Structures are given as C-alpha cells and as structure tokens.
Amino acid sequence: MEHGAKLKPWGNLSTSLVVSGQEVNSDSLLAELQLADSEEFSSSEGVGVYSGPGWATLTVDERHSKSPDEQATELIGFLSSRKPVLDALKEAGNSVKVDLAGIAESSGLGLYLSPDVLAGLAELGVPVTFTTVRESGEDEEDPLAWLD
C-alpha cells in the first residue's frame, strides 16, 4: 500500500449549521427546523443538535462519515428544504452560518469539497466558514534536538 493512501489529514471533522443569538438554544433550533419529530433526523447516526449560552448547532460528525463531502451533503439534505427557516433566523437578527471544523493532523493538506457540495452550500444562502485547530502537545520538531 502506498504511504500517502491512508494519510488522515483531519481529525474530529464535523460540519455544522451554527446559529447564534440571544434566544437560541437546542430546543428552539429543533423547533425552528421542525426536526424534533423528524424520523430522518432521529434515525441519523452522527447527527445531533448541541447548544450553549446563545448558540446552537445542527452538527454532522465523524460517526456519520469522515468525509467532508458526505458530512456537508447530509447537512444540505436537512437544510435545503428548510431554507425559509434559515432566512427567518437571519431576519430575526441571529448569526447563521455553516462551519466545517477539524483538527489538522498533517500540515500542508487542504480540505477538499466537490463542486456539487459547494454549490449546495451556496444555495443555502448562508456564509460557510472553516475552523481549523492545530493538534497540540505534539511538537513537529524537538526544539532541544540540537543539544545531542
């Protein structure tokens, strides 16, 4: 097997709809998106709603797929029929975006999204952001190596 074939460039990759605003929480997001009673939502592995003070996310994570394309496609599937809700959330003064987040485990590798997925994200009409966290605790080079 070729060395580069199994290189895993991204850890903890997730693709999320992120809504932030004063009145936002997981219950309100589930209600707005009408996902609380959705069979499709409740049966989807690796898809969940999370929240904290003033924010909530609809997140597709690595349990669903390690592929950014597949994660984004799943999220687009939930959201494309709910675009009026996204517009209403924005009109109510909330910040609404799609965020792809992950830990960069190898330097110099990009995050590739297919043109179809990018077009699907564009059709949602919300900004797309990328949050990259560099893995800590593992120095790429030992700063004291020159002492040997």
Image (spheres, rainbow, N blue to C red):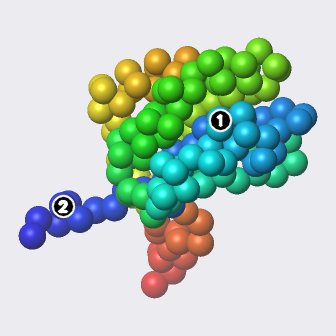
Q: Nearer the viewer, residue 62 or 12?
A: 62
Q: Residue at x 72, y 19 (%)?
A: 88
How far, Cα to Cα, is label 2 from label 1?
39 Å
Q: Is any atom of residue 11 visible in this view?
A: no
Assign a secondary structure to mark 2: helix
Direction from residue 28 to residue 110 in the image, left or right: left
Direction from residue 31 to residue 53 in the image, left or right: right
Q: In which quarter of the image is residue 98?
A: top right
Q: Is any atom of residue 147 visible in this view?
A: yes
Amino acid type, mark 1: Leu
Direction from residue 35 to residue 93 in the image, left or right: right
**Relative image position of residue 42 (x, y in whole percent):** 55, 56
**Relative image position of residue 128 (x, y in whole percent):** 55, 29
- Location of residue 68 with respect to 140 vertically, above or below: above
Disc number placed over residue 5 in the picture, else none: 2
Q: Residue at x 48, y 77 (%)?
A: 145
Q: Within 10 angstroms of label 1, few (less than 14), some, or many (20 or more) residues?
A: some
Question: Which numbered mark, 2 or 1, is in the foreground of this view?
Answer: 1
Q: Mark 1 points at which residue?
A: 33
Sequence order check: which comes first, mark 2 or mark 1? 2
Assign a secondary structure to mark 1: loop
- Give the residue at the far left of this rendering: 1
Amino acid type, mark 2: Ala
Q: Which of 6 and 3 is in front in this view?
A: 6
- Location of residue 124 with respect to 18 vertically, above or below: above
